[in-house]
Image: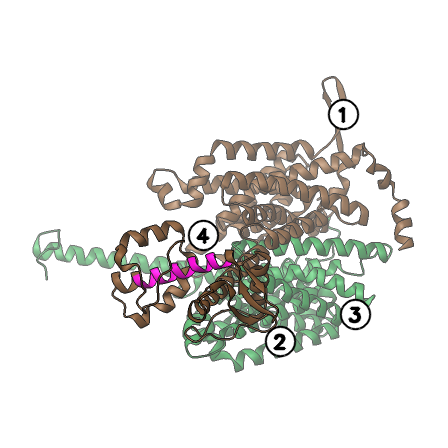
Amino acid sequence: MDLDVLIRLISFSDANTRVVVIGAGLLGLCSGVVGTLGVLRRRALVGDAVAHAALPGVCIAFLILGERNLPGLLLGAFIVGTLAAWLIALIRRHTRIKEDAAIALVIGCFFGVGIVLSQIIQGLTSGSRAGLDDFIFGKAATMVRSDALTIAGVTVTCLIIVAILHKELRTLCFDRDFGQSLGWRMGILDALVMTLVALTTVAGLPAVGVVMIVGLLVIPPAAARFWTDRFSTTLIIAGIIGMLAAVVGTIASGVLPVPKTSLSKGWPTGPTIILVAGVIFFLSLCFAPRAGVIAAFIRQRRNRSALSESQSARVCSTGNTSGKGVA
Amino acid sequence: MGTFAQHIATQPLVLAWVWPLGAGEVWTLACLIVCAIACALPGVFLVLRRMSMLGDAISHAVLPGLVIAFLISSSRSPLVMLVGAALAGMASAGVSAALTKARRVREDAALGVSFSLFFATGVVLISLYASSVDLDPGCVLYGLAELIPLDTEPYTILGHVIEVPRSFPWLLGAALVNVGMITLFYKELRITTFDAGLASALGFTPWAIQAGLLAATAATSVVSFEVLGSILVIAMLVAPGATAHMLTDRLGRMLWYAALFATTAATLGYIVALFLETNIAGMVAATAGVQFGLAVIFAPRYGIASKFVRRVSLSVRIAREDILSALYRTSERATPDPTRLTLASESGLLPPINDSPDVVNGSRLVCALARRSLRSRGLASITAQGELSLTTKGHAMARDLVRSHRLWELYLSRSLGLPADHVHAPSHRVEHFITPAIEALLLSELPANLRVRDPHGAPIPSKD
């Protein structure tokens, strides 16, 4: 752990670092905001399914394109990921299988297909997997300018849509039936939320990877829920927490100490981002002013002592403990 | 195509098609099947209890447990790994349950938080201690089924020394333990799964059964994870159970079906993977998904296709019966010889009839099918003018329908006191579902002297 490394990272003097940190930060912001919609719609884990289903999408796109063209691969991931979300909805609606099993099925089976395809690609390209493995675990540290620009585009799109449809989305999240009764097309709005989740998931794949993107989508909103009850404030806080986790995680992965025996040069960026988000989550869980565990504990104690005080006051004034006839 | 044939011909596997397969292939297949069954059995309960995603979370969360157990014991002692990983899996389930209890985080989000954190911890630990931990993050996800035949231990069975894959005894143990637990606690599992409230009222302890099920899931996914990999474990936990659920309502049968589908997925997946030279575990999971897809479409009772066929055949029956009774009514009104009446041309739809404007409710397709089935069942024939005409058999059936209709009208008007202009529409819907038993009940309700005319004054045809 070198101080000058830390200084170099924080001061953004290095162009590469600047790109990585800005890209990761935007991704965190976007997934915090979009993830909030997913979590409030109780679709938190659909993002996980979309992410896993993106793997076969990437592979199919590679087989069609024949080269590692990032926008093309991401388009494939987006199409197959959306297909997976749609499939989950279909299974839930038209069969006796419940949503949880539908999600688990899609995760397992699509990922299986993805692994099969990626191995076939490995055979075709004589040994190299054409960097497809990067999509599984993510490689935020190798983010380049065009990756960051893709993320920025997705982030701006998502934020604009959320800002414009803010009122409708709030109704969707808290009282879908009311929205329906107003004649709003809630089905389309629901599909829009899933599309935004899919878009964010796919944009985050190269950086955080298939398995852990769900953490970025779920942990910031879950943490934000401890700080506020208001929809718009939740969106903002979740966005900030996501961004904070991504930026701190990216920097931390460069400066945290590694054991001497380790072969790797630093902490893997994607998982570090998730762990930082986890730390923020547990801080929120404990220390949030009203909903936090400690606040709740103190409130409980105070209530109990207030109760026992009034009880003893009552005993003193009337001499009976049953409390009858006091009022 | 030629290159594909060449490709197959040069495969050593083609030789293995002729029994016996090589020992390596047989052992791999045995491991896959046993592993799939071991996962599928607790998976049935996960599916029924809507806990599938908990299975997913556990199979991800065993990763840090494996690594930590490995680092502490600095050995690959399977028992240490098993205990460490199972503890981690249980811990993740506990964390998500605690978060759900804190009320601010819903169950799905709590699962997402807990398993992504556990998994991230595992990946960080693996890459930090990569030199001392013998685990590759990729293989953690998609298994090492390919290496099963290479990693064997000699066992002496009945005096013979056999090279058994190292993971096989563990997989077999997991499968046997799961079978034993399910047999032993079958009643408890069944009652807590289908009626948790009744179970606690009867003095069972649902939470203990739940914890046992989670422990079994965790232990099974740890043992299976070397073969299938953590994400594909979830496919084998859920897919066979869900497929079985499409086919049956009975728990016992569901368990057998799940074991069967696990076996077929493992076998077919393995064979296809050998042919395509691709990842075995991935192919097994994909096969399990295809099986589920087929069950969703073709399951006899709950499948989409059979539901569709049932719905269409019901509409066709109703349309057919509506045509029959419309023909009967026209015949009643127009001619003294009821069998010789014609109504509609073969090509067009039925024209509306005076008193019932909606002779046939249904699409063009349903009408066409109804017409065809009238002819194929010998209920109506086509006249020289291309019009439908009742046969004797058709006439008898139409008479029974109209009789049911008018009896119901009479019943509604007499027993429910509905005015005469309100009784046609409900009777028009009900007439298709009046069985002889219901008709007998109707007759017993209506005095014989009244059973002559319906509320509109039309005669109620007698039975023969």
- In the rendered image, residue B405 lying in the magenta stretch gets the answer yes
Question: Which residues fall within the magenta stretch?
Answer: B394-410
- Does the image show residue B277? no
Indicate the quadrant containing the N terminus of chain B: top left, top right, bottom left or bottom right: bottom right
Label 4, label 2: how far apart the Cα atoms are: 33 Å
Few, some or many C-alpha atoms within 10 Å of disc 3 (few <14, some 14-19, many ≥20)?
few
Q: Which residue is mark 2?
A: A155
Task: Write down the chain letter for disc 4.
Answer: B
* Chain bearing mark 2: A
Q: Colour of chain A?
A: green
Foreground tag (1 vs 2): 1
Residue under mark 1: which chain is it in?
A: B
Q: In the image, is residue A78 above or below residue B6?
A: below
Mark positioned earlier in the residue sequence (2 or 3): 3
Q: Residue A135: percent from the left, percent from the top?
A: 71, 61
Q: Secondary structure at mark 3?
A: loop
Nearest-to-viewer mark from 4 and 1: 1
